[in-house]
Image (cartoon, grey):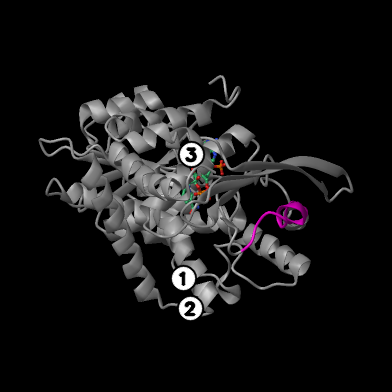
Amino acid sequence: KKRNPGQPEFVQAVQEVAEDIFDFIQDKEAYHSEQILRRIAEPDRVVSFRVCWEDDKGNIRVQRGWRVQNNNSIGPYKGGIRFHPSVTEGTLKFLAFEQTFKNALTGLPMGGGKGGSNFNPKGKSDREVMRFCQSFMNELYRYIGADIDVPAGDIGVGAREIGYMFGQYKRLTNEFTGVLTGKGLEYGGSLIRTEATGYGATYFLLNMLKTRGEDMVGKVAVISGSGNVATHAAEKVTQLGGKVVTLSDSEGFVHDPAGMDQEKINWVKQLKTVKRGRIREYVDQFPGSTFTPGETLWGVPCDVALPCATQNELTGEDAKTLVANGCIAVSEGANMPTDLEGVHYFKAAKILYAPGKAANAGGVAVSGLEMSQNSARISWKEEQLQQLLVDIMDGIHSRCLEYGQQGGGYCDYVKGANIAGFKKVADAMLAYGVV
Ligand code: NDP
């Protein structure tokens, strides 16, 4: 806390990892003496820069941009860019730290990074977003590259923003390389990337359920968020026979007791990515559903839960409510959506609980596959990529089981993910010596 004043999310993320790692390294002298955890918890570098842009009325606006390059021991820095008014250096440090473990867990050669700005894309015209993205890249391009640091999308950064940023990078460097992932299919993007995070979080959920002889059929699912991750999680849960009854945004949540079929999910995707509307509009379209402003949705009874909006959206109290209502499994599509108290509660209750760094790694994994395709200048087929995503999520699940088994059939997935991710990065760092 003293080292990182005013960065509570970063402190929270490091604390959560440290709790598990301390146990694991007790009898492993090299990790101690070489101060590996301390070194991973200090980003390689944090770049902060000014981003000026002109709005449609001709006003000059000034925002702040960052890129946190946390660790590149096992591959180029890799992690998304977030545009949201809540973004601070501390938020991005926590995300870059988490990303380091997540990327290691995928088994692919990717280090950890994260970037973003306190720019709020909501209510801005396309042209304003374009000018902002171009200006952001005018500075960011100095620090990234296909073999150096490969950013992607995150909250507030989807296909439109990646297109504007990639176009500007290409213009500035006169290079066409795979410097960003999440690109459009016409210019080097990969099939399945858009779906990968939400699908992957659902595959992980299914893998956990299977350890208790269960599957998704007939399970009632509550999902938060209504962006990229939430809508694709909803789609896959539905395809596997589950019933999704909620989605949300920062204004509140919709509850649809009849369940959301593909047609309803497609409508939400259009609402959010094309019309850029609010989730409350759902109730006008689909009678029988209700909108509750302001509150969180964790009080809606369910069998499984997928928090897919943002960090710390699920508190200790919410965790208690979920378990009391019969929820048996939680798979985090978002990054660190459960606060520390909630994590402790899920662990104590011994429900199936997957942290974001394991459950939502499908997105960055397919980003890794996009990098491979770009380097080889080829495009893989959809079935091939679908299968690779399933295999990678299976691999992550197995690695969590390997390090997280606690006896009595209970797996602590948080511990498993932390240790498996740490070990890979730590061993590479030991090989490099003290640098
Ligand atoms: P989107 O921008 O597509 O959607 C974000 C959703 O979360 C929106 O419904 C948004 O509502 C809601 N939300 C955002 N901030 C808040 C907040 N402070 N309070 C309440 N609701 C909020 O983002 P993604 O779906 O891409 O990302 C969601 C989560 O998944 C994030 O934690 C992200 O880091 C994580 N993630 C994303 C990956 C990806 O591939 N996209 C990969 C791995 C993790 P509103 O529209 O009102 O803001």
Q: Which residue is mark 3?
A: 40
Q: Is residue 82 above or below residue 174?
A: above
Which residue extends farthest right? 58
Q: Which residue is mark 2?
A: 379
Q: Position of residue 350 (x, y in %)?
A: 20, 32
Q: Is residue 144 left or right of residue 325?
A: right
Q: Residues within 10 Å of mark 3 (few under 14, many from 20)?
A: many
- Occupied quadrant, residue 247: top left
Q: Residues within 10 Å of mark 1 (few under 14, many from 20)?
A: many
Q: Is residue 31 left or right of residue 268?
A: left
Marks 1/2 in contact by CB < 8 Å: the verdict is: yes
- From the image, state whether disc 1 or disc 2 is nearer to you: 2
Element type where label 3 sits in the image? helix
Q: Is residue 146 left or right of residue 372?
A: right
Q: Position of residue 101 (x, y in %)?
A: 42, 45
Query: Which residue type carries mark 2?
Result: Ser
Q: Earlier in the sequence, mark 3 or mark 1?
A: 3
Q: Which residue is mark 1?
A: 191
- Occupied quadrant, residue 170: bottom right
Q: Earlier in the sequence, mark 3 or mark 2?
A: 3
Query: Which residue type carries mark 3?
Result: Ile
- From the image, state whether disc 3 or disc 1 is nearer to you: 3
